[in-house]
Amino acid sequence: MDMNPRTPSQSATIDRLAHHRSGLANYQRHGRTTDINDHSDLQVLRRIKRYLLPKNFTISPTLLAEMVEGYDIGDPLADQLAADGVRFARPLQQSIMKDGLLSTATSHIDISSETSSHPAFIAMQAQFSEHPDWFDPKLAQIGAVAYRRYPLMLIWLLRNVALMAGYSIPALSLPLIQTGALMHDALPRLMRTYAYILAVSEHPQLDASVHHQRQPISQVLAIGSEGWRQSIKVRQIHTLVRQNLLKGKLSAANGVIPNSDQHHNPDGSWNTAYWGVPINQTDMIATHLQFSLLIMRGLRLLGARISPEEAEGILHLWNLASYWMGVDLERLPKDEAACWEWLYTYLSIQQLDFKMGQPLAKALHDLPRQLMGEDNRRGRFVELVNASVTRTLVGDDIGDGLDLPKSKLRFGVLSSVPILFALDTARQHNNVVADKLEAFRAKRQDNMNWWLKKNDDYYK
């Protein structure tokens, strides 16, 4: 006989907890996935949970199941085209823009009937020919203006937060290492990534500061804009890398990362049972949040005043970019609070292996002295500042894991907080100050584009 009969509400609570535990127990289908409590002491997770999540937050079994499902899905439209040997980037741009309206970098090509009639190509034409109904160009422009307002902070955060934080996750690092590009051509890869986030955030207000002659864009991420063009190009690159990894054709990690850590299939091909599909839906959303949410959070921590509307605009801007890159919109978190819940959940279950990310971190960290000379004091100082940004904003545990130097003055990067906050406050209340700051931003941005002006036709 039950001496403590349960009330209906107690029974319902117990049933919910049992369902919750059951849901949590079913998510570890891939070797890359850890228990949700394995990284609870990670500094970045403790900070997210303490400052950015509701007090009663618990990981959702539904979200976990969605993430795990996303590991096995790449980019269905682009993958169909790749399977049939179709290189879609230039034909897609040309078929949509017609009559040479694209930049001169895209020369005229003949589009075969097989390509133009391919169902996946037709579907992709529809995706890139016009903006989706949900896209709000005014909101996206508000986000783009805020995103572009702090050029030095932007590249700091791209390099030392968005990219470095990702290097601690083997599932994100291994595809990059396999291609070899980020280890052997770190500067071009960094600047191409920087060029992409600049292209995504290009907006009409920048026209006055543009020195080169080209058609000004009518709105953020306009059809035919540089952000639109690069989204198509990068989507094709991701698709080709995905297909080559699945076939075991990319092997730059051999000799750099032990074979046992790569978890290859016996024939050397990519192990989808362990990693999921390379460059999959879930990992692409993580990259989306690296470029939007993490950079936005870093700007705020360094003193930038980003309003709720600007934050919404930044996420909206990157939602369209991610949609164009092949991400399923239904999988994207809907607002900033949902983004933090998504990121916390994702980081909680990722197998961490700092040794795999160390070659990438070293290549990125060593860039200043490669450019300025091994014995250049300024280069060493810039490296320490960069490492300090990572340690301060991401955490010492990740900084230690990636073998980044630790400066005694590392919290000096936070000296920017009162300065940037004061300048932003003055900008909001004084038009003269705002105009001067915009002129300074434009000049600083132009100086930082030195590599792109030398090597990229668009920025020349």
Image: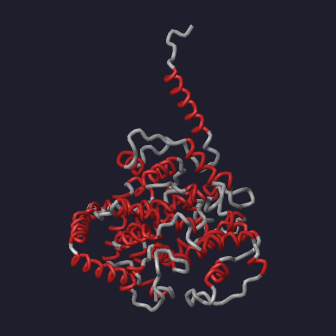
- Above or below: residue 409 compared with residue 62: below
Horizontally, residue 54 falls left or right of residue 135, namely left
Q: Residue at x 21, y 78 (%)?
A: 432
Q: Residue furthest top?
A: 1
Relative horizontal placement of residue 189, taking residue 76 as reference (left or right): left
Q: Residue at x 70, y 66 (%)?
A: 79
- Residue 187, position as x, y percentages in the image: 47, 77
In the image: residue 193, left or right of residue 108: left
Residue 315 visible to an observer of this rendering: yes
The outermost residue toward the front is: 133
Identified at 46% across, 70% down, the residue is 137
Q: Nearer the viewer, residue 135 or 358?
A: 135
Q: Position of residue 6 (x, y in %)?
A: 51, 17
Residue 414, quarter of the rendered image: bottom left
Image quadrant occupied by the N terminus = top right
> Residue 311, image x and y in percent?
39, 61
* Relative depth, front residue between 375 and 157: 157
Vertical order, 213 against 282 (above or below): below
Image quadrant assignment for residue 295: bottom left
Q: Does 45 sit left or right of 438 as displayed? A: right
